[in-house]
């Protein structure tokens, strides 16, 4: 029996056997890292539980606004401070808050293109100044860090006119299609797009780790199953998925 099946067996022991009438469709909201996780872990859970998992993926800040506007969900996996805000507003059950995974920010180029030098802070600065175009998120935890970083490095003005800020998570797609020469976003986003290639993480002294934190909706009619999904994302097999996709446990 695999580790994942052991975890699933333990989860199923916590509740009575699910009949077809009891099976629920659970809506999980979060960014692309969540879709990657559930895409690999979800099928075995669905088979064991009878529940169906659907993931609505978008920039975490956009998802948070939708929740605040009244969108229904069962599990949210957002950036830690966003989840904390939803706990404070009563949208998420406080006791279900759980750090799931974290990832540093990386640099992407189109697959097969020469990889620029980003090995040091000075090398990164030269690469960004010399680049024809740069793309990163319009809003997000990585954006907050990058906007401040570029000011600190003294290159904000030099790169402003050639920077494309995306409204969605299509940073890596922009690089893969040639819309932009260099993309900067969390590492798993880069690894999830076949046409994009990871150059590497930002130099350690200027990188930032983004923590993704889950919670169950206070209005969910499927709270027990939603809690199981969070346990699934913290299971031993989830650790394997994280490592394979450029993430670390939270």
Image: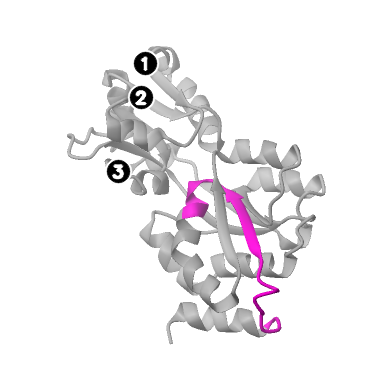
Where is residue 194 drawn, in percent x and y?
29, 46
Is residue 102 visible in this depiction of the protein?
no
Q: Quadrant of residue 205?
A: top left
Is the Cβ of the residue at disc 2 closer than 8 Å to that at disc 1?
Answer: yes
**What separation in Å lies between label 2 and label 3 (alpha carbons)?**
14 Å
Residue most extreme to the bottom: 1
Residue at the spot of label 3:
198
Is the Cβ of the residue at disc 1 closer than 8 Å to that at disc 3?
Answer: no
Camera-side residue: 211 or 20? 20
Q: Residues within 10 Å of mark 3 (few under 14, many from 20)?
A: many
Q: Quadrant of residue 155?
A: top left
Would residue 160 appear left or right of 64 to someone viewing this image? Answer: left
Q: Residue at x 74, y 43 (%)?
A: 85
- Give the mark, 2 or 1, whose residue is nearer the N terminus: 2
Q: Residues within 10 Å of mark 1 (few under 14, many from 20)?
A: some
In the displayed structure, 109 sits above or below 235; it is above
Residue at the spot of label 1:
162
Please give the range of residues in magenta.
14-35
Q: Residue at x 58, y 48 (%)?
A: 30
Residue at the spot of label 2:
134
In the displayed structure, 109 sits above or below 194; it is above
**What separation in Å lies between label 2 and label 1 (alpha carbons)?**
6 Å
Verify whether residue 30 appears in magenta: yes
Is residue 9 visible in this depiction of the protein?
yes
């Amino acid at each position: 029996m695999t580790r994942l099946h052991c975890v699933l067996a333990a989860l199923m022991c916590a509740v009575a056997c699910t009949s077809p009438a009891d099976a629920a469709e659970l809506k999980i909201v979060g960014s692309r890292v969540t879709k990657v996780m559930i895409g690999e872990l979800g099928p075995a859970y669905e088979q064991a539980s009878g529940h169906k998992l659907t993931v609505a993926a978008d920039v975490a800040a956009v998802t948070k606004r939708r929740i605040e506007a009244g969108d229904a969900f069962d599990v949210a996996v957002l950036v830690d401070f966003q989840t904390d805000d939803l706990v404070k507003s009563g949208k998420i059950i406080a006791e279900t808050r759980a750090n799931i995974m974290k990832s540093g920010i990386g640099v992407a180029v189109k697959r097969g293109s020469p990889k620029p030098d980003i090995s040091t802070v000075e090398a990164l600065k030269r690469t960004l100044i010399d680049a024809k175009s740069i793309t990163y998120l319009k809003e997000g935890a990585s954006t907050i860090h990058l906007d401040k970083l570029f000011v600190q490095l003294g290159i904000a003005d030099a790169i402003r006119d050639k920077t494309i800020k995306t409204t969605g998570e299509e940073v890596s797609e922009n690089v893969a299609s040639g819309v932009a020469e260099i993309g900067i976003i969390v590492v798993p986003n880069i690894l999830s797009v076949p046409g994009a290639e990871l150059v590497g993480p930002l130099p350690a002294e200027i990188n930032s780790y983004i923590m993704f934190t889950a919670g169950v909706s206070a209005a969910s009619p499927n709270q027990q199953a939603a809690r199981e999904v969070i346990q699934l994302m913290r299971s031993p097999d989830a650790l394997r998925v994280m490592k394979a996709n450029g993430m670390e446990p939270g």
